[in-house]
Image: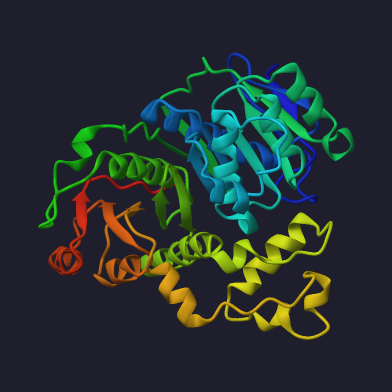
Amino acid sequence: MKEIQLKYGCNPNQNPARIFVEQGELPVKVLNGRPGYINFLDAFNSWQLVMELKAATGMPAAASFKHVSPAGAAIGKPLSDVLKQIYFVDDLPLPLSPIACAYARARGADRMSSYGDFIALSDECDEATALLIKREVSDGVIAPSYSSEALAILNDKKKGNYNVLQMDTAYKPAPMEQKQVFGITFEQLRNEIDLADESLFNNIPTKNKDFTEEAKLNLKVALITLKYTQSNSVCYAKDGQAIGIGAGQQSRIHCTRLAGNKADIWWLRQHPKVLSLPWVANIRRADRDNTIDVYISEDWDDVLKEGTWQQFFTERPEPLTMQEKKEWIAQNTDVCLGSDAFFPFGDNVERARRSGVRYIAQAGGSVRDDNVIETADKYDMAMAFIGIRLFHH
């Protein structure tokens, strides 16, 4: 097949729309549904991310994409009981396979942003993963293959309209890539930079030069995630997954703050008060996610005031105080941070430190590198200047 007709382009008024190749055949098959323009943009970007993550780590990988940036990305490390609870996968009747663990992490890190996502899996989608996908609000999935049980489950999702794509793992794009803007064609060499190379950590200007193997793994997750995130972008990572992604901001400090706030929310969801919230029976997943998000924010009274809390809880929970939040966030340690370009000021390091960051990988090359290094040294952080910019547009 050389082309696929789409429902419409970015918006319903942008029709007709299609994807096509001028030579050869498309490397993707539509097994179910009718994907749209943005679906395919998410699918192909996320597919590159998970395949690169798998190649760099040797582990199955998954990504959750929204509007051409990842809401989450992860490798298939086993989940702790707490992570199973906050990702709401502790009730699955089947054991979690490595690819199911990767998807649970990718989807669960930022459930608010992942709502209505497009999913990418580096390995065959099995029954356990399909069962997790079935109960989430999602637009579609791309994977190299599907078990018969998984395909039957996914084909039944969204009244039979769920988008299921199969990607040819042997496909290699041409080294030069093109796109059109305003009728003008842009061309550039594809970004094939190897982010699994250990030489990335050769230039360490900080006094602390101790990058643990776990830190290197998490920084690879962060940097590969950033390679497919709309710039400017910053990614916090821990335990084999992105825990906070700041994408598409004009200011780098805003990226760092946005991603840091998401990382804090990920950690706050593990607070004992959140884990013990007394939910009413049969609360919808989206309502539960939204309620948690408000409960741990400064607007907690919006869900705890009289006449409102009864919609979500069997009894009114005690609020999570600002002091309790600060004390809990202070317990999050050894977080890794990647940036898709240099930090121009030390304020990025100051903000990162408040979310438990101990390891940083950034391009370096700012006229204020000395200030950035000095700030990292103040908190005994290890920071590598990787000399690579990862802008993506």
Residue in view at x 19 percent, y 69 percent? 375
Say which quarter of the image contains residue 134.
top right
Residue in view at x 14 percent, y 68 percent? 374
Q: Nearer the viewer, residue 23 or 195?
A: 195
Residue in view at x 20 percent, y 67 percent? 379
Q: Say whether residue 368 is left or right of residue 229.
A: left
Q: Nearer the viewer, residue 64 or 343?
A: 64
Residue 127 is situated, as x and y percent measured from the top left of the image, at: 71, 26
| Vertical comparison of 189 with 201: above or below | above
The answer to whether one can see residue 198 in this image is: yes
| Vertical comparison of 30 with 266: above or below | above
Q: Nearer the viewer, residue 2 or 367?
A: 367
| Vertical comparison of 335 with 331: above or below | above
Residue 361 is situated, as x and y percent measured from the top left of the image, at: 27, 50
Say which quarter of the image contains residue 295.
bottom right
| Vertical comparison of 293 with 113: above or below | below
Type of colouring: rainbow
Viewport quadrant of the N terminus: top right
Residue in view at x 47 percent, y 65 percent? 264
